[in-house]
Image (tube, rainbow, N blue to C red):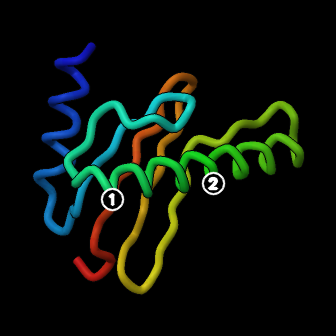
Amino acid sequence: MAQEVEETMKRIQSHKGIVGTIVVNSEGVPIKTTLDNTTTVQYAGLISSLADKARSVVRDLDPSNDLTFLRIRSKKHEIMVAPDKEFILIVVQNPTD
């Protein structure tokens, strides 16, 4: 499993414009990252909290539904979030690339 995660992160990281990737557990604690520690902790905490809120909204609208992907675009970055049962994959990229 760990090897599969490593290969996936390397494949994602090889794409043009990718700033970094983070895998966090269900509590928002970073497990793997390609970013520096300060940036990782900031993104992990804030994005996992946002993903929880987004998942809650989706379930409030339809209890049989679930959040599968979340994309946030700002002037500086685009953040793609793929939540799973136990982990959340966060990918940060430059939006112009």
Measured from the top left, where is residue 73 in percent x and y?
47, 74
Along the line of sight, which residue is nearer the eye, 64 or 40? Answer: 40
Which class describes the residues within 10 Å of circle 1: few (<14), some (14-19), or many (20+)? Answer: few
Front: mark 2 or 1: 1
Q: Answer yes or no: do the residues labelled 2 and 1 have beta carbons within 8 Å?
A: no
Q: Can you say whether 76 is above or below 41 in the image? A: below
Residue 80 relative to residue 91: left or right: right
Q: Can you say whether 31 is above or below 72 in the image? A: above
Label number found at residue 39: 1
Measured from the top left, where is residue 36 in percent x and y?
22, 54
Sequence-first tag of 2 and 1 = 1
Q: Can you say whether 79 is above or below 95 in the image? A: above
Label number found at residue 16: none
Q: Amino acid at mark 2?
A: Leu
Measured from the top left, where is residue 46 in percent x and y?
55, 55
Measured from the top left, where is residue 21 in percent x and y?
28, 49
Q: Which residue is mark 2?
A: 50
Which class describes the residues within 10 Å of circle 2: few (<14), some (14-19), or many (20+)? Answer: some
